[in-house]
Amino acid sequence: MRTPRRRLALSLVAMGAAASMMSFHVSLAQSWTTLAAAPAASWKKLNPAVSPSPRAATAMAYDPVSRRVVLFGGYDDLFYLNETWTFDGSTWRMETPALSPPPRAAASLAYDAVSQRLVLFGGYDGTAYLGDTWVWDGATSTWENVPASVAPPAVTGPVSFSDPVSGRAIVFGGYDGRFYQGGTWEFEGDSWTELSPTTIPGGRAAAAAGLDPVTHRVVMFGGLAGINPYNTWTWNGSDWARELPATQPRLVYDAAAAYSPQLGGVTLFGGADAGTDLNDTWLWNGTEWSSVRTGRSASATARTVPARSSSSTRANGPHSSRESIDIASRSTFT
């Protein structure tokens, strides 16, 4: 059964103590930053001289070692990519590591404070759901494959974040081609350990998650699932908790989330609702969601423009359509 077309509207990435929260619009290959003045904020379009070619379903995270945002892979309507780009707040740079992960889209990427590496997991390459683990060393700009003896199931669209207590990279959920997963896994440097929280969110993929370093909680919202994912969850380092805010954003998948120091909470942007791209901006303050008043909003809709790459895999066969990488959802949200 075909699902709503998934278009990753915007990937927001926290820039630590930087003066602004930065993001990259992967569908249009445009860069935006928020100029925040709580309780309102405005979007400002950036114009870097060089940018990655248009693509969707990239993996992105902030690397505090290099003090740069790292972007990997994605899908450009023709190819699954394995380029690595970094962004310092004003300039994009294409990295040229000697070794790179295979091409993929819809993988997860998160910083592991213990190993001081970014951890890449999962994704989809046009043929298979992936379960390999790679780490990015921001000090040397190199990738390394981690042949983990134990790892999460091979999935596309997992959620990944830094644990608020241990600093370890955490992976939750994803879609394995048949089922939405609901396991919580912690990276151990050379392997993975499945955690055993008392409370477990329903399995899902393409959800948004962001770490609030002040409350030491991760908030997760929405996604695609077999059972209604229209809910808000928080992770405290050992257990999940279902939150009951008075109001919530619309149910979205492929939204992006990052902490905003200016707004004092995790900001949620964009995503899609039943195939319609959105450009709403919401703020999670630790207990409640509120809609953020914005000036000019980052664009929500875009047609991905094909762009060939020497480091890419051609999409073909039954998985050449966007629906295949965008998590085949058979669910009806009830």
Image (cartoon, grey):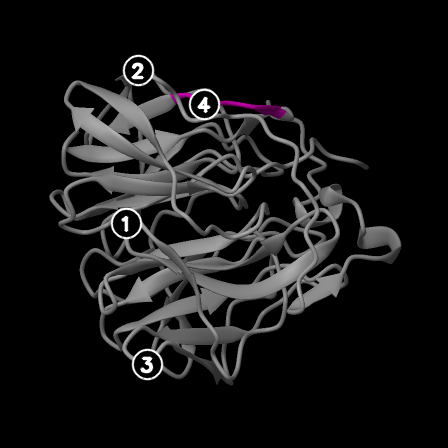
Kind of residue indicated by mark 3: Thr
Q: Which residue is mark 2?
A: 295
First reached walking from the N terminus: tag 1 or tag 4: 1
Residue 14 location in percent, x, y? 27, 47
Disc 2 to disc 1, C-alpha distance: 21 Å
First reached walking from the N terminus: tag 2 or tag 1: 1
**Disc 1 packing (10 Å; few <14; some 14–19; many ≥20):** many
Q: Which residues are magenta?
A: 276-280
Disc 1 to disc 3, C-alpha distance: 20 Å
Residue 133 location in percent, x, y? 50, 74
**Disc 4 packing (10 Å; few <14; some 14–19; many ≥20):** some
Q: Which residue is mark 3?
A: 140
Q: Which of the 4 image quadrants contains residue 323?
A: top right
Disc 2 to disc 4, C-alpha distance: 12 Å
Answer with left or right where residue 123 lies relative to residue 259. right
Q: Are marks 4 and 3 in contact (CB under 8 Å)?
A: no
Q: Which numbered marker is on residue 3?
A: none
Could you say whether the residue bearing mark 4 is in a helix, strand or loop?
loop
First reached walking from the N terminus: tag 1 or tag 3: 1
Can residue 130 be found in the magenta stretch? no
Could you say whether the residue bearing mark 3 is in a helix, strand or loop?
loop
**Disc 2 packing (10 Å; few <14; some 14–19; many ≥20):** few
